Every structure is written in C-alpha cells, then in structure tokens.
Amino acid sequence: MDPKMPSSPSKVFDQLVDAQVAIESSTDRQHSMSSMELAPPSSSLSASLSPKKSTSNNSAEFQPRSLPLSPNKLFSHVERAEAIPPRAIMKNHPQQQQLLLQAQPPTPPPSSSTAMQDTVERIVNAVENREASSRESALVNGTVAQQQQQILEVTHGGPFTSTELSQLALLCTFGFSSSSSKNGGANQSQWATVDGDLLASLTPLLRAHVTTAMRVDLVGEGLDVIVKTVKTESSPEKKSRPVITIHQWMMQVAKYSGPNAAPLGSLGDSKLEPGAGFNRLQVLLCGLEASNILLSIMASPGVDRRVVEDDTLEACVTLMKNHIQKHLIPALSNTGHVGVSMSTTSDNGSGGGEAERTPKSKKSRSVSPNRGVVAKSLKAVYSPILSTVGQFGTMIERADVFVARNEMDDSLLFTLSGAALSTLTIDASPLVRADAVSLASIIQVSSMDLIAAIFRRYPRHRSIIIEDVFPLMLKLPTSKKSLRTFLVKKSAASSSTSEVAKGPPTSNVADHDYIQPICALTLLLIQSCVVMPSQDDDEQMEGAEDSNDSWALKDDHSGLQGCVAVCNQFTSQMLQRCARKGEEGGASEFRPILSNLIDDLLLVRHLPEYPAAGMLLLYLSHRLGSDLLRASSAAKNQVEATYLATAMDAFGKITSAVAGSLQRDRENPFKLPDSMNLCAPSPEPTEEINRCFCGRGNLDTFMIDCDRCHSWHHGSCVGISKDTVPDIWLCDDCTLQTTVVEQAKVFARGSRDSDSLTSTDHNHVLRQLLISYLSWTAQASHSQIAERAREFLIASWVKQLESSDETVGCFDLGLVRNFAISQWTLPTPQPNQQRPRAHLTDDGNQRIMTSLVASSELCVSFNRLLGVILRLMGDKLASLRKLSVKAILQVVNIDPALMAQPTVRKEVSRCFHDESISVREAAVSLVGDYIMQSPNLAAAFHAPLLERIVDKGISVRKRAVRIFRDVLLSNPTYEGRVTACHAMMQRAADRKEDDGVRDLIHETFHTLWFNSKAFDMGSTGSPAKSKPAQLGTKAELYCREVSAQMVEVVRVSGSNEVLSTLVKGLLFGFAEGDKDKKNVERKKRQEDSHSQCKLLVKALIELLLSFEDTRDHKEDDGKQLVAILATLGVFAQSFPELVVPHVDTLVPYLKGDNGVKRYEGAVVSQVSSMISGASSHFSSGELNRLTSGELPTDLVNICYKFPSEAVTSAVEALAKLANHPDAASNSVQEKKLLKLATQFYSYLLKTKDVTNDFSSMKKSVRDNVRRALAALGSICRFYECTGAADDHTLDSSVFVIETDVAKLQLSNLSNAAFALFLRYLSKEDESTKCLALRAMNGVFISRPRVVLVAEQMGIITSVIGDEAPPSVQIESLRCWRDILISEEKRIDSGAAKAKMEAQKDVTLSKRIGGDQDGDSSISGSVLTEHSERLYALTLSKDEKVRHMIIDLIGHLLRQGLINPMETVPHLLAVQGDVKCPSTRALALKLLQNEGEKRPDMLRQRICAGIKQAFHFQRNVYSGSNNGNAKVTALIAKSDGPKDGWETIFDAVIKESAIRNKKAQRQGLLKGIISLFEKDPGVNCSSAEQLPMLAFASEILGNFPYTSLSDPLFIVYHSSCIAALDGQGVLSQFAELVGGDVCDPNSDEDDIEKSSTQGKFDAAKLGLEAKGAEFGQLCVEAARILPLLKLKQFLRKAYNISEARITSYVPSEKELIHEKGISIADGPPFSFTMTSIFDADGNINWSNATKIYSSFRRMMRDAEADDVHVDPEPTKSPKRTAKRKRGGSDQVEESPKVSPE
C-alpha cells in the first residue's frame, strides 16, 4: 500500500479531503516497500525467540492506542468554526466587557506536570470565582452579574469561555505525549499527575457544555426560521412585521436589516433572533471541544477512576450520536428539507408557524414550490456544520482509544456503534460543498475504526453488531456516483472489474479504485478478530479458557478462529436474507447488495491490506455452492428462482475470478531460484536492456540501472528520483532471488537431503516480504487497516504452516513458525526510519500477491467450484442448468483453456442436446464466446453448431447464426465456411423459418457477399481513402472472392436451389405486410444487392474463363464446372438480362464436348436454362445472330444425346427462341423444333403397337421411348401456339392420333401427342405408364382444360385408384404437384396476367378482377373432386405413396383447395406413421401451419385424429397380435439427452398453442376422455372399440404435461366415469352370476379365485349358458378398466396425493408450484387389450375372467382410496397429506413437482 495513502483516521484525513489533488500533484511517488530482514543470519534464532503468552483480550489482543498529538494537526485541512470575536461581543453586549476582561489570554502548553496542575487549577478557580461573583452580585446589584453568567451560558453553553476550552484542549495534547506508545496502558500520562479532586471538579463543568450541546439542532431550528420567513413574506401583514433571513440568523452581528428593521426581541423568541444561529453554533463547538477534553482525560492511563463517570460518558456518546444524525448526515446529504410540508397559511391556520415533517410512509409525489427555496436556504446552515468535521473526527479517535482501554456499559456501546454505523448511510452531495465526498469519507473512515475497536474489544457483542449491519445495508446509497466511495489502491483484479470499481464522478485517480464503505467495514471487522497465535497446545488451551470469546475454536492455534466465526455468521445471515421468497425481508434488495459485495471483494483480494477478502469469498463460495446443490434436490416450490439466479451469478463470478488468478500465475510465474546456490550475476551487457514493468520504451526520462542484472528501469516507475539514487539498487527480480537464497540459508533444515528449493519455500519468503511491507506501512502511516492486515497475514501463515508437510521443501517449519509469531508486536517506529534494505516496487508487491492468491485455499478449491457448476449443468431443473451454463461461460471467458478439459467439453456437448431451449441457447453462447477468443479451435465445435442451426428454439438458431457470422467475418479462410453457409441458406429457404432468423441470415450473407461498401473499407473498418481506379480494383477482387465462395457452396451442396432462394430473398424480399423497421432494412439490403449482381455475374464469368485456362481436364473438373454454371444460373433466374452480354461465352458449352464425361448432361442443362431465361431479353439483332448460328442445332443435338433433364432444358430453350416476339413466322428455330417433334412423334407412332410390355424390349428401345416421350411432352409444354386457346367445352374427340406425319404441325401437335400418350399409358409395364403420365403432364400444364377431358375419360381415377401400381400412383401425385406449382408460379410471376391482357375477348372488368382466363383453378377443382381418394391414399402401405400424398396435400392446403377440417384428422393419423419419420415430419409441419391459423381446430379434431391414427396403424402395418395388427401410441424420443418415450401426438401438442392455455388443454383432454364414455343412444358397447380405447389411454398416460392440473383433470374425470358406470357394471355382474358367486361387497369372489388359480370352469359356476351376456359385461368393464389403470399410473408418475385428488376441482386456478412438472423416471404407460370374443363370436373365458378379476380389484382399490383419506390442510397447500390404505402404515406425500 502506498504509505502516502493510509487508511487510518489518525493520518488519512489530510489526504482524503481532496484525494484527487493529493494524488495528481504527488511527484515523489513512494512505492510498495518490501521485506525488512526476515531473520538475523544466526543459528541461535529459535533460542532467542520468546513471544509473550496471549491469555486475555486485554493483554495481547487489544493493545491501547496513543491519542493523536494534536487535533489541530490531524484535522488542519478542515475549516474550523469561527470563534466569537471579542470586539463583536463588546459591541453588541456591553455588559460582557467585564466578563472578557476576566478571561486570560491563551498560554503555551505547560512544560511539566506541575505546570499542568497549575493551569487546570487556575481555570477551575476562575470559573468558580465567576460563579461566586455572579451569586454575590445578584444579591447586591440585582441582575448585572447574573446577566453576565447567562450570556456566557447562551454563547458557550457552559461555564467555560472559548479561550479556557482552547487551553484545556492544548493540555490534552500535551497530556498524552508521554503515553503515545502502543503499551500506553502500562504508563501514566500527565493527566494522571493532576490531583484527582481537581479533575473531579473539572469534569462536571465540562459535562455542562456537552449537555447543553446535546440539545442543539441547527438544521431543525434553521428550518423554523425559514418557514417563519416564508410565512411572513406571504402574509397580508408583511409590511408591519419584521423579517429575518437564515443568513441574518447565522450572522455574528445581532441586528435586523432591510425595510422592516426592528429592535431585538421583536419576534418574541430568542432562538429566532438575528445571530441566534451563530450562538447555537458556538454552543455546539464548545460542546464538541468539551467532549474531546473529557474523552482525552477518561482515556488517559493512570487517571483517577472517579473521573470516568457513566453520566459523563453517556453525555459524550449522546452528543456524538445527535451530531451525526441531526447535523452531519443532513448537511452532507443535503436532506435537511426532506419530509418537510410547507404551508403558506396564516398563523391562525392549522399549519401553525413551524415546519411540519411528513412521515416517510406518507410522502407524496407532489412537491411544494417552496421546497427548493428551503433546500437552498439551508446551505447557510450546512456550511458551518461541516466546519465541525475536524473536531468530530478527533472525538471519534479519542472514543476509539477509550473503547480499547476501558470497559463500557452495553447500552452505551450499542448507542456508540449504532451512531458510527449510521455514518455509512451518508450520500454526500457536492451541491452543499465541493469537498463533501471527501468530508464524508473522513467521517466514515474514522467511524469504521471506532466500530472495529468495539468489535475487537468486545467479542460477546460481535453477533449483535453484525446483525445491525444488515438493516443498514438497505439504507445505503444506491446511485452509481455514491455507491462506491471508499478509496483503495488498484490491484491485479482491477482489469476484470474496471466497470465495477468506478468511484465518484469527481474522482480523477488513475491508479486507484473504489469500493463500498460497507465492504471495507466488513473486511475490517473480520481482520479485527485475529488474535496472536499460540506457541503450543497448552498455551492455546489456557488462553481459550481465560478468554471470554465464545466464538473461539478450541482446536485452532492460528488465531483465526474469531475471523472464521465472523465469516460464517456474516455469510449465513446475508444468504438467508437473499434466499427469502418474494419481497419478504427485503430479499429483492439484498440480492444486488450481495452482487456488489462480491464485486468489491474480488477487486481487493489482490491487495495486501485486505487479506480477509479471500477468506470471506471462500466461505461465500462454500455456502453458495451448498445452496445451489440443495436446490438441485428440492422441489420447485421450495426454491426461489430469483435467488438461484443471483447465487449462480455470484458463484460464477467467484469461480471465474479464481480461474483468472490461476491463469495469471500460470502465464506470469516468478522466476525464483530452485537451489540455495545462487547463480553469479550476469556480466554487464554491451547494449542497454529496458526491462521496466510498465512496458514503455526508452523514454526521454530518468532511468536507473540494476547493479546485478544491469537492466534499466524508469525512475518514476520504481520510485527513485535523481536526488535519491541509492549506492546499490536491485530490480524486483534480483531482489527476490537474493532474498530467497539468503533466507533459505537461515531457515534451512540441518537434516535436509539437498539444497533444492520448492514452491513452498518460495511462498514462505513471499509471505514475509508482504508482512514486512505492511509493517513498514503501519509504522509510517499509523494505518489500522495495515496493522490488522499484517496480523491477519501472520495468523494465516501460521495456519498454513500447521497444515504443511514438514518433508516438503528445505525450510524448517518450526523455525519459520516461531519467527512469524515473533513479529506479532509491531516495533516502535524510530525517528527518520528508512525503508528496509530489500524492498520491492508496486509491481513487485502485486506479483507477490498474485502468486500467493493463486496458492490460497480459495484457489486450491477451484476444482471443487468448477465441479459444482459442471454437476448443475446436468441437473433436473432447467433453470439451474441454464444458469450453470452461463456461469461456466464466465469462467471460460476468463480462461478459455478450460474448454480443453474433457469434463467441461463433455458437459457442454451434453447441453447442446438439452431438452430446454434456454439451456441449449446458453450452451451455444458459451461455445460462441469461446470460439471468438480462440478462432483456431472453431473446427472442434463446427458439427455441434451446425446441428443447432436447425434447432427447434428460435433463440438457439439465432445465436448459432450469429456465431457463424462472426466466425466467417473474422476468419475468411475458415475450413467450415461452405457447410456453414449451406446450412444457413437451407434455414432461410425453409418456409416455416422465423422472420427474425431469416432476416439475420440475409443480413449475414449480405455482409459477406452483397455488401457494396465492403471493398471501400480499410483494415480498421473505417472508409479507406482510395482513388477511383483503386476502388474499382478492390470491388473486382471482392466480387471474385465472393463468387468463388458461392461456387464452392453450390459445389458441396450439389444444387443451386438454396442459393437461388437466398438470392431471391435478398433481391426481392421474403415477406409483405406490416411496415416496420425491418422492412426498411430489407429494402436497403435489396438495393445494395441489386447493385452488386452485375459485378458478381461478371466475376463469375471471369471465374469460368479462368477455370478453362487453368484446368487439367480431370474428371473432377466437371463438378467444378457445373458448380460455376449453376451459380451463374442463380443470377440468370433473378436477372436474366445480366447474362445477355455473356451469351457467346456460354453457347459453346451446348456442344457437349466439354471434356467432363459424367457431368456433360448437367453442363448443357444449366446453359440451356440460362439461355431460356435470357431469351426474352434478346434484341432482334441478337436473336437473329444466335439463331443463324449453331445454337438451334446444338439444342436439337442435346435432345438426341443427353438424359431427359437435359432434353427438357434444351426443348424449353428452343421453344422460347421460337416464341420470341421478334422471331419470324417460319424461323430456323421453329423449323428445328417442328422437325424434332416430328421425328420423336414418328418413332412413338411406329413403336406404339410393337408390344404391350416394353420391359421385355431391348434397353435401346426403352431408352428411345423414354427420350421420345420426354422430348415430345416438353415440346407440348413449352411451345405456345398463338391464337390456339382451347374452347370452354373441349371435346375429347379432338384427341386423335395423327398417322400422317406430314400433316403434323406445331399447332395440332398437342392433340395428336396427347392421344399418343394415352396409348402408351395403357401399356402394362409401370415405367412406360410413368413416362406417359410425365409426358401428358406437359399438356396439362400448357392446356389446363385438357385436365377436364382426362377427368371425363377416367384417366385420373385410373392412375390414383387402388388398381394402379404404387409407382404410377406416385408419378400421378408428382404430376399433380408440378401442375399446382406451375400454376402458382404462372400467377405469381405475372405470366397469367400478361396472357390475359393479350387476349382481346377479356373485358376490362374481368381484368380488374384478376386472372380471369378460366384456367387457373381447373386442376385444383378436379383434384378437389378426388379428395376422398387422396385421403384414402394416406393409408397406403407404400411409404413413398404416403409421403407423396402428404406433400400434395400441403400444396392443396396452402392454395386453399381442400377443407382443413376434413384434412386435419388424416394429418393427425399420419403421426402414427412411426416407421416413416420423414412423412411424420412433413405432416407435422402442415399441422403446425394449421394450428397457427386455427388453434381451436386441432383441439376439436383430436378425437377424430386418434381414431384415424389407430385405424392407420391397423391397416398399414403388417405383423399381427392375435389376428390384429400391432398398434402403439408410443415412439422413441427423437431428441433430448435422455432415452425415453413420447406419444405420436407429443410434437403436435408442443408446437401448437394448446399447450399454453388451460382451457385448450382441458378441452383436448375432455375430448379424448369422452371416448371412454358410454354412448347414451347405444345399449351396449362394441368389443371392436376396446383396442382403440387402449390406444387412447396410452396417449393420455404419456402426454407431455407441464402442469399438475392436467393429470389431475384426467384423474378427476376417470373417477367420475368409474363411479357412475363402474358400480353399475358390478351390480349387473352380481345379478347375472348370482350373489353366491359374485358378491359386489366381498374382497375376492369365486370367479376371481378360480381365474387366479387357473382352474376356471364355466359349467361348474353355472356360467356356460350365460357366455354372451357375461362377455358383453366384460366389454363394459374393459371400457372402464384403462381409466382405472391410468388413474393409478398418473398418481405414481406425478406423485399425486389422494388428498390432492379429493380436493381438486376442474375450475380452480392453477397453482404456481404445480407448474413446470415432469414425469418421474420409469417405464411409460402401456395397456394391452385382450380379445373377449374369438373370430366366430364365441367368448374366450380365459381372457374374459382376467378382465373381470382386474376390473373388480381396481374398483376395490379405488373405493379404498376414497374412504381412507385424511383431509388436507386448507391453509397451506404445500403441506403433506397422509393416507392409509388397507390398514397399512404407508404414507404418501404430496406431489414432488419436477421442473422442466
């Protein structure tokens, strides 16, 4: 600690008043000192040590302190109150002249005890003479002398004059000069030499001044004056009444001024006269001076005990308390006017003439307009009050010494400590005085020392004082500028808590920090409890017996037992208050206090002055960890969520700080000698080496050279100036090395095996260096904090020595321990004492503290702290898991290397698959921060982050996208760039993706690829100043890089579909509707992206050319070529005109000789598509130039050489060229197209009758047929005949095969081709049928009315009927999907509108109505007619058919072509397709869409969905169980860290709005339960329904319930059905079988017994003839039996008490503690229904009797549960309800709710 910044009130005040000026103006910096000599180099050290035995708190533990030399010296910087000028008194009060003449002038301090005796006697005699004279004069002269005495009492508050009090104050200073040593209790001060009778006469006179000052209330009296003034000025009689201002009241000259001047006494109240305030101030000052004198006398050792009177001491304590609460706190905080209600009514009104203070509980927001006037006027009172801070500080110091030397009454102690504690609530306001913050610090620091003295002196009161601290915390200032005002030195931990350690805004101290005064007080109290360690066990036990400290630990010899007890109590009390629920006990206010406290402790734990911070943090971490682990096993209703968040945040802060300490010590270790043989000094280097710790270079400043290593250091950094250069100077490293070796030689064991030094040996030396530094600081600055810290460090060292292994290291631990204890008593400081020879700089001391902190008990427990967090990451409470992940994030941010630990990575990886979204988000954030700190390790978490991009949680996806965005922007060469881009583009292309996620992805790619300003940025992100040519070059380079990245993404993904979707989204937007801020951002991105497309297309063309120039003609080159062309095709789709200038570059690729064998088809397909899209933008000249060349021929050749995909693209391009508006009627391209159509038509015509099964033909024939059908169908689709629109009544007779090929034209090609396609559709082989359907689809798309013809001809019915093969069904469904998509694109793109406008027969009104060409809804209408067949296809046994039909239904739903109410049950049924997850997922998406639009519909149709799902599994799945298909409602969980089961409808419930609304959930459950109710219109239930009821019960038993009200709702209705129908079934059984066989009231009847024994005989029991009736009753019982089983399962699975079931009402509100439940671990609910009747309708007696027995047993159990129920307490629903079943002692608890 800097010796010029002491913390003791005996020296700190001169510097704290203006800390900024003191620190900034200090040019001669004194840095941290180092070690005094550890030990003399003597072998007889241990023999010379003889520490004193500590037997009581008064001998060694509480040493008396010397009083300060002079109060004026200590507080010389504080403005003193002005004394009464004699001239002024004589002028205003002539009768005081005689009194002043009697007063003697001040005399110098006496030089001997005799002179002191004479001075005191003279002053006392003078007072007695004045009193006697006053009495005699009163008898003789009347009132003159009496008036003189009254004036003296009014102006001074007692019998002494101010001069006499000053003389006595000087005597106090001199009286303690002889007892200033630490052992002042053994000496006698000069006060002890004064006659006891004389002192006994003096103290009552002084007490009179104190008693009078106790009644002074300057602020309150000043308020009365201000109120009187305000009322007088506002009254109608203002001109006739005298007015007094607050300044006149405080003035010395007693007179009125102003227009209403009047004689004194006009107001009728002496306290309201001018000058009265000044007189009251003088009374206060005299009282404070008298109190100082009294405390000085009473605290002096050896003084006559008659002087120490309880009344006198009580008066001094009361004055101190009143002065704090009435004067100092209001003056410093500027709060004297708070709570005052101003009124301007007349004196006769109810307001009266005084200020009325409003209670705090009745404060109003309305403020009187005079409130500001009052506050401003009171400053005239505040200023003189603040001038008393000097005297008050001296009073606290002397009270501190008195407490240490004398016993006090408990009541006075509590009053004194309470007054001192109240100073911490001061919220200093600079509006009162510029140095108000410094004055408040003076008072607070001295008050803390006083509290610490009481705490140290009286162990029995420590608990009470600690408890008093907590209510005080709620009154502390909370604003940022006044929260932390206690000045501390900057530590190694300041860098991580720089935001926390900000002090008042007026501070401008760079090398200091600030903490809360309450934190400093807490640490001072803990450090004050340390006692001197004992030498052996006997001494310790003897000292413990003599001590009255009940907190002592009998087995601790280190002296830290009191500190440990205080830490335990403080930690326990603080966390108990924070853990209270709700607002109970101010819990919400204590939690931020705890957080701030831990921030401060972490800030100062690296400072030598506060070693107790580490101990307090250790106990806080232990208790916090225990609370968190306890919450892990507690029920949710027993845990306060807010406290858990606070506790985990605090625990994470502590753990991260410990990790930082270990990291700093690991990265910057001490290079200390490992042997006692020190290496020789290095020779002086030839060049100067600068090793200054500041890191600056060789500045033009004074530097000093180390005499050992010859390194240079700045003089200002090491605290040496040119005038103070020592003869020999060593740097920190050399000082440490030499000191370690020297001390090792002194303390080494004689029996050591080697001279090696260990880290333990090093720590001994480092500890001693800190103790020596604190010793010198305590001597130089009289700092109590440094002295207590020094003792604490010694005790901690002794404790560490006691637990150390003597065989580790070469030091003799016993010798070291004795020497450590021998330093307990601080040596008496000598005049002009110099620093020890071996001393370190501030940086050296900081490094020592960092090293010792890293080896402390807190840091050693790091693995335990980390283990707690890792354990909680797998807790059952989702909130705890989330908080623990955030805590580990704090730790990893400090030390990223921890992520390399297998245990940490394992837990983080597990959290990536946590069932809670918040936990997954926290884990992703953790990894994201880790990756940004260590980019080279991003590849290790690449795969897990990719999985989170498709996470169910929107926040998780957003976070994953942000992480990849940051990684891609910061690391252009990231290896996972391609896969990350592809994954993000897939999310953006998903229709269901959230707009926020899609916006983020678009923003990411806009920044990466479409940012026009990216190349205009310098390396720092600011606009670079470049020439236009340079900018152009940068733009080109940027676009080349972007184009290469795009190509790579397309190459890896294998398709340009996702890139195309992304580009369209960026260019044209993806959402319409509300005009919000995001739309503005989207438009900006679109404009920016538009401008970039041209450059990107140009860059892609350059990349293509560069590829051709540099490729090696390898087989893999084809993939790269296809990727480039596909990427170029993306921009060709969005902006086809951009490709027009580069057509000549693309056309050569159509020849198909590109040297890429496998990829030739893909190449020509991509180029054909681009030319097709760009054809509409060809000019007439461009069109003629291209078509007159080889382009048409190349396109025709493609149709003969390449697969059907390429054929389709080539035909489309050729047809677009033929349909170009500028093309001639008989153009080359049209001729080529007709010739191509004729050739393929001819071939199909020739082969149509060759065979009915082409699968038996040669492969060449089959390929030719495939090519011909594909080409002819594409020509029919893409070529548009002008003026050839179909009639509304299209006749099927027009579709005739044209046998004369010569008559074939493009105008009649479609009809002839359709007829030909029908012929091929009738073939027997499935592949030919599919090819014919695909070809016919081209006709349907181009001519929608042909669909009607196909419907009339029964084609549609035939291809989707049961007779059609699955492949034909799939192809037909795919064709219908393509038709719908094509029609949708035609309308959305505007092509339909353009075609409509081109038709002259469409009127204007129809054009306004939209697409009225009559073709837009034909296909959908036809499909709607076949909706029942489409629904039936969902039950197809071919999973590909099921997938295809669900896909088609999705398009129909989106376009509104089918009824959602009819469709939803079929989609719910597909949720039972457990063997085809992709189909289930597709149907789930559709259900989610409908659920968002119509939430009630899912609830209403769930019953129908359950029935459909049951029938789906029975009809679709093979495998039988007793002749029936195996049906199950359970599937394995698809996600989550734990293995388990879920129902087929879980995903539907989770993703819909049903889960969040109680009414929706209950409606859903009631609908399912209604399946079990008996139909009132039916006499008996059907046995065929029983398997479906078992299926429904499995769903009810395994639904994902989140509130206990849901299973209670099921149990409630199950009980109702069982009670109503079950009892009736039992009675019917009894009537049918007979009472002798079946007794409804018996436990077990004959049927049950025989069934259990396996000896059932229907004939013997007389049931053989009643089989049908008995079987039907078993059906009724089987209908109820699943509900009984379900009730029993839910009770156990959710731990529901019978009392809770009994008290449940469906209409009651959900209880908070019953929310967030989860099912207990165990097998899922499953119920198997056995068949009662066989296939012939005969009863199966074995199965029937089993159902009968189970039903009766379950009914008996249910009845017993209802009977044996103890009523649950109504006042506390949390208490346990007990129940007895069957006479057993089993107790069932209330539900243990497991949160998510």
Image (cartoon, rainbow, N blue to C red):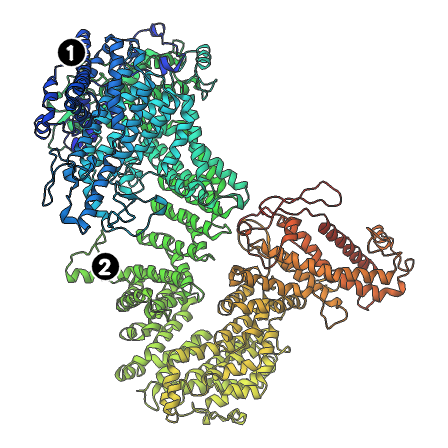
The residue identified by callout 1 is 110
Percent coordinates x, y for residue 1178 in the rendering: 29, 80
* Residue at the spot 55% in from the left edge and 44% down from the top edge: 635
The answer to whether residue 1332 of the structure is visible from this angle is yes
Sort mark 2 into few (<14), some (14-19) or many (20+) by Cα contacts within 10 Å. Answer: some
Compared to 1463, does 1746 lie above or below?
above
The residue identified by callout 2 is 1015
Q: Nearer the viewer, residue 1269 or 711?
A: 711
Q: Nearer the viewer, residue 954 or 1098?
A: 954
- Left or right: where does residue 387 sit relative to residue 1771? left
Quadrant of the rendered image containing residue 149: top left
Task: Tell me the CA gap for discs 1 and 2.
Answer: 87 Å
* Residue at the spot 23% in from the left edge and 37% down from the top edge: 221
Does label 1 or label 2 sit earlier along the sequence?
1
The amino acid type of the residue labelled 2 equals Phe
The amino acid type of the residue labelled 1 equals Pro
Percent coordinates x, y for residue 218 in the rendering: 23, 35
* Residue at the spot 64% in from the left edge and 56% down from the top edge: 1597
Percent coordinates x, y for residue 628 in the rendering: 48, 39
Q: Nearer the viewer, residue 586 or 240?
A: 240
